[in-house]
Amino acid sequence: MKKIYLHKVEKQIARHNTIRDINKQIVLNYVRARAPISRAEIARETSLQRSTVSAIIDDLQLEGLIEEIGTGDSTGGRKPTLLRLKTGTPVAIGVDVTPRETTVVLSDLAGNLLETEEFPTSSDINYMNKQILAKVSNFVDLYPEANLEVGISVPGIADQTSGEILYVPYFQWSNWDIGRQITEQTGMEVVIENDANAVALAELWFGNEEIRRTRNFVMVFVGEGIGTGIVIDGQVYRGENGAAGEFGHMFVSENAPVTCSCGRRDCWEAHASEKALLQRYASSNGSAGQGSIDIDHLIGLAQNGEARAINKLKENAKYLGIGISNLLIGFSPQAVVISGSITKAWDMIKDEIEEAGRRSIRQEVKTTKIVPSALGDRPSILGSISLVLARKFASAN
């Protein structure tokens, strides 16, 4: 009788499962990227057997990940059935923490927002814990059958490996354990990321097609501060303990209009952030503080022709361009993507930004594209969702 070596059988089973799971990921990602798409097209483009594709599609439909949306044009035989990601079914809870406002959203697999809750961000960490836990738990209670996970975007240093928020400089919070609290209360998995890294991931998932196809780019997130997300070979580079990309604190010039969140007045953030812009505008009007005007109001004034608002936007853009020129020298990326509300004024500021970029590049080096994001003025919301979707698409099994 032939002897059976169990360890060999286990290896064969493991290898079979691995191949099956990889194929499942390939098919799911083809549906995400190419929808509407047919089974035949997937088989042709992936070189998988038609029977393998059909079996995987059946599994993905049972799991509620994809759906049929009708038929396409015939090329001589039966009309093909078209597929897309299933929409309307909640799969992700996103928590986007900014210095001014925190947003908790419920999203489907395609990134469509199904529910949204907002509240003012407080420096009281206990208040924040209660608010976030209550709103996340409310979504869980509303959809008890959903297979939900949570993504959290924070304006600070987060170690995605350990799930720890190490430091949020704006509020001087250290070792914030909101992820652990959510898991203990709801049982859900939580992934946490620095806001700029989360936005860089969102560019890969939801950005315009040109950026989604770009392998190496730097995303500059301009808000209350300045953050940078670095994408190398299609992957977000996080560095040790998630601390890479803190270029908002690099030296740009002295005597900035505001103090950086780190306490200095020579950082890029202190010269080129939204708060720097608002302070410049307020000072030009003889005001000591930023006053009640916000970034949207200032941009609206500039778009309506107010010279002072236009001048201060351009002055801020000059410093934004100086920082970007340093990134171009250091990384030589294919593109730099600028994200945040400031992009609403792109036509008024792009010349100042691009001029600084041109000065930083040697003539023999191909010019890097500097482009505005297509994600809107709160891209970190999409960033928080992307953290969950990336895990689901990477581990579809």
Image (tube, rainbow, N blue to C red):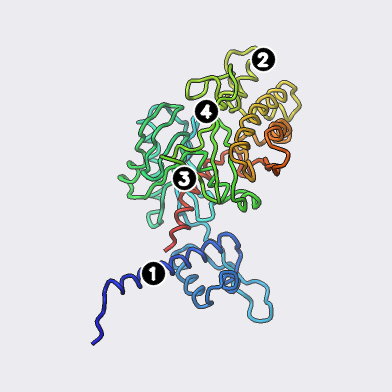
Residue identifier under label 2: 285
Residue 345 in view: no
Residue linked to disc 4: 249
The N terminus is located in which quarter? bottom left
Residue type at mark 2: give it: Asn
| Dot 4 alpha-carbon crowd within 10 angstroms: few under 14, some 14 to 19, many 20 or more | many
Quickly name the residue at label 3.
94
Real-space CA distance between mark 4 and mark 3, rounded to the nearest whole angstrom: 27 Å
Q: Earlier in the sequence, mark 4 or mark 3?
A: 3
Instruction: Give the amino acid at mark 1.
Output: Arg
Disc 3 from disc 1: Cα separation: 34 Å
Marks 1 and 2, the one that precedes in the sequence: 1
* Residue 161 spot, x, y in % from top left: 39, 45
Distance in Å between CA atoms under marks 2 and 3: 39 Å
Compare marks 2 and 3 and give the one earlier in the sequence: 3
Judging by the rendered image, the residue that carries numbered circle 1 is 15
Classify 10 Å Cα crowding around label 1: few (below 14), some (14-19), many (20 and above). few
